[in-house]
Amino acid sequence: MLFPRDDEKRYQWMAAAMVGAYNYWREHGAPESVLSDFHGWLSATWEFKQSPQRVLEDGEKRTQRAALSGHILLRLIALARHHPERCKLEQAKEIVSQFAPRDGSSISNSLLNKVWAEFQGVSHLWATMVLKMKEEMEGAIENSFWAEFLGISEAIRKDALQSRLVSPDLVWEAPDQKDIPLIERVEVEPLPADMLDILQAHFPS
C-alpha cells in the first residue's frame, strides 16, 4: 500500500515492520514459538542503508499522503452514487483539498495529482483504511480483522471499476481466498451541503 510501484522499498518496509514487531513482542515476553515467526526477516535488514527504525519512520510519514488516495476514491464513489452530474476527478479532489484532515490547512491540487498518480491502484485499500480509522482498531492484530479489511477493499474495488473511477490496468486485486468474506456493497453517504456548496462555487452547474 505504501510503495505500490517500488518492489525494493516495499520489501524493506515490510522487513523493518517485521523487525519492529519482533522487538515489540520480545519486550512483552512473547514465547519463542511466536518470535520464531519473525526470524526470517532479521537478515533482510543487514543490507539496509538506514536503520530499520528510520525505514519504518519514513514509511509512517508517507502514510498520511498515501491515505489521501482513499479519501479521493471515497469522494468519487459518493459522487458517482448520489451526485452523478458532478462525478469528475477534479471535483473529488476539490472536496479532499478542502475537507481532508491535514493540520487545519487545505491540500494543494498538485499534491493530490501526484498522490492519485502514485496510489490509484491501491486507493481502495486506503479507502478501507480511512473507513476503519473511524472505528476501534483493537482487533487489528487478528487475522479476522484483515480478512474483513480485504473484503471491504474488494467491495470498494469492484464498485470503483463498475463506475469507471479507477483504471483496471492499475488496480490491485486481492487473491482469491476462502477466508476473505464476500461483501456486496459498502455504504457511502451523499455529500453534505457544505461540500456541495464548495463544488457549486468552483464548478458552477
Image (cartoon, rainbow, N blue to C red):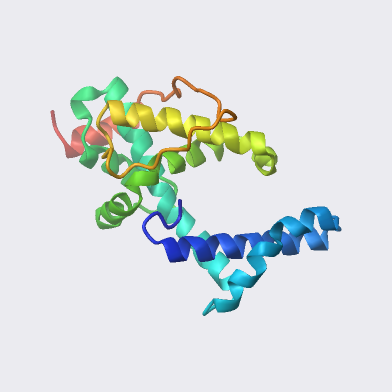
Occupied quadrant, residue 188: top left
Q: Relative to 181, is 73 on the left or the right?
A: left
For residue 89, side relative to residue 51 (left or right)? left
Q: Which residue lies furthest to the left in this view?
A: 205
The answer to whether residue 103 shows anywhere in this view is: no
Query: What residue is at 42 percent from the left and 52 percent from the top?
Result: 66
In the image shown, does 125 or 108 lie closer to the viewer?
125
Which is nearer the eye, 196 or 181? 181
In this rendering, is residue 26 above or below 137? below
The picture places residue 135, in percent across and down from the top left corner, at: 60, 35
Q: Which percent across, then down, holds residue 42?
A: 66, 68
Quadrant of the rendered image containing residue 16: bottom right
Q: Nearer the viewer, residue 22 or 64?
A: 22
In the image: residue 150, left or right of residue 41: left
Residue 90, image x and y in percent?
21, 42
For the point 47% across and 60% down, the residue is 10
Locate the C terminus by quadrant: top left
In the rendered view, tell whether residue 169 sits above or below residue 161. Answer: below
Residue at image position (57%, 31%) is 148
Is residue 101 at all visible to an observer of this figure?
A: yes
Image x and y of residue 95, in percent: 31, 40
Q: State the image quarter where residue 172 is shown.
A: top left
Task: Give the mark count.
Answer: 0
- The residue under the point 48% across, 55% down is 63
